[in-house]
Image (cartoon, helix red, strand yellow):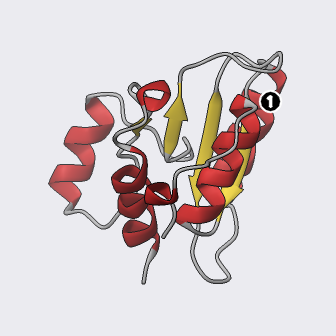
Amino acid sequence: MSEHYEQSELFRLTRSRPELRWMFAIPNGGLRSKATAANLRRSGVKAGVWDIYLPRPSKGYHGLFIEMKYGKNKLTELQQEFFEYATQQGYLCKVAYSADEAIEIIDEYLGSEVHDEKYKT
């Protein structure tokens, strides 16, 4: 298991949920060559921006950012700075350590519960 696996699993488990149609991943991490990293920076990718964004207002927030972590990983300094900025701007930011935890965060944010077992791992 890995952060990549859990994030992929989250999108697999939620792909048929219409309320999550526009939830997307932000490709700002991962191991890359120096040339690829430079090209991504030039095209607007920024270190510290969180992994997943749900552009849907709920519960007084403008949208939801989720940062996927695995094992004992913690937020980096840049991710903490992004958390503080996004929170001040009216976004909810949550860290998830598994696909299931991310689904719980999303369902709580949207004020719904998952009743269909096909969304469970």
Q: Secondary structure at mark 1?
A: helix
- Identified by mark 1, the residue type is Thr
Coordinates of residue 72 in the picture (x, y in percent): 68, 82
Residue 93 in the image: state x and y as whole percent.
Answer: 72, 40
Pick whichever, 28 or 120, lies toward us: 120
The residue wearing badge 1 is: 87
State whether residue 26 is above or below residue 100: above
- In the rendered view of the protein, which quadrant contains the N terminus? bottom left
Left or right of 5, for residue 107: right
Residue drawn 69% across the image and 16% down it: 62
Q: Residue at x 43, y 78 (%)?
A: 2
Residue at image location 38% in from the left, 50% down from the top: 11
Residue 99: x, y in percent?
A: 53, 63
Vertical comparison of 9 with 111: above or below: below
What residue appears at the point 61 percent right and 83 percent down from the top-left corner? 71
Outermost residue toward the front? 116
Residue 90 placement: quadrant: top right
Q: Name the quadrant containing residue 65.
A: top right
